[in-house]
Amino acid sequence: MHQEALLKEIRKKIGERSLNDEIANILNISYDAAHRRTSLKAKFSFEEALELAKYYQISLDQFLGTENQLVVKRTQPVKTTEDLLNYFENSLKILNIFQNINHSKVFYSAKDIPFFYTISDSILSRFKFYVWMNLLNQDKFLSPFREFNMEYHSIKNEMLKDLYDKQNVTEIWNDTTIMSALRQISFYAEMGLLKKDDSDLILEDLKNLLSKLENKTAEKENFQIYVNDMVILNNSILFKNEQQCSFFVPFSMFGYMMTNDKITCEDSLSYFEHQIKNSRSLNESGNRERKIFFNKMYDQVEEVRKRLV
């Protein structure tokens, strides 16, 4: 029964491709051995079932027999620069299934500026990597920002950023979404690890990012920002389309629990939609509302700039 259900899910994923060929290639077995499994004459081993579920990102929750238990994946802990770069590369692998499929949507509860915006080749991105490594590195405190020479930018990062940019994205923000970035800039400047010239450049880069997002809300139909001042945002992310979904819940800075369980994804979508009903859209509320919101952001940036003399 479980094997039949697993095969049914795989058929949904592969479309018109040969099921036997797929099974044979993934499990590295013969065509005849694959046929015996797809015809239910032989059973998958536990390891084979896990391998197929992992490859096709099929949730194992439906095989548990209870709706209140979940099988979740978690990201690997990030402690070194290599770990951090691997984190983004692995994120690209996980999300690549949403790359070429129509009708995909993303919902992002933006407690902080979404990390997809700060993994490019910019001084703001370089500073964010500097901060991340200071906070994640358990062995030592890093040297001043100007001495930070990590190879933080890669083609994988750009591909991940582009993948997100091409999605139909709905982000939920509030007035505190940029506060962590501003506090980080203030902290390292006051510690003497960030020079005034550099903090000015980072703040200017942050303003440029906000300006791009402001223009994006006015120009793009597949990008929306909603403002919700009533709930505490948590950086949870939902990717979904007609075939599959992935829901990410943070448990640390770069630690996420991930599930492909359809019921959980539907529940999270329902909650996102409920938040949106109690939010105001910067796309649909007109230029005045949008200007008021982003001007508050620009003012916060300028207040930090003036304070860091």
Image: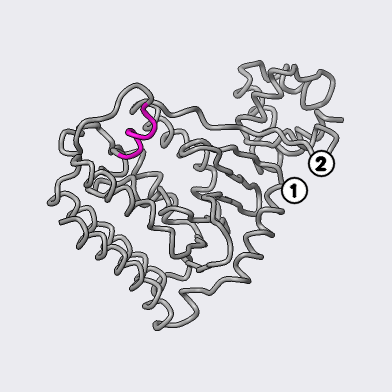
For the residues labelled 1 and 2, say whether their Cβ atoms are less than 8 Å apart: yes
- Which residues, given as a range, are shown in magenta? 131-137
**Secondary structure category for the residue under label 2:** loop
Is residue 129 one of those drawn in magenta? no
Q: Position of residue 251 (x, y in %)?
A: 55, 38
Graded by Cα atoms within 10 Å as few (under 14), some (14 to 19) or many (20 or more), the crowding at tag 1 reads: few
Image position of 192 with respect to 182: above or below: above
Could you tell me which quadrant the N terminus lies in?
top right
Name the mark on residue 263: 1
Mark 2 belongs to which amino acid?
Glu
- Quarter of the rendering containing residue 65: top right
> Which residue sits at x=74%, y=18%?
46
Q: Nearer the viewer, residue 253 or 244?
A: 253
Horizontally, residue 263 falls left or right of residue 293, namely: right
Query: Is 194 positioned to the left or the right of 137 in the image?
Result: left
Magenta highlight on residue 133: yes
Q: Which residue is mark 2?
A: 67
- Mark number displayed over residue 175: none
Relative depth, front residue between 254 and 307: 307
Q: How is the image coloured?
A: one colour
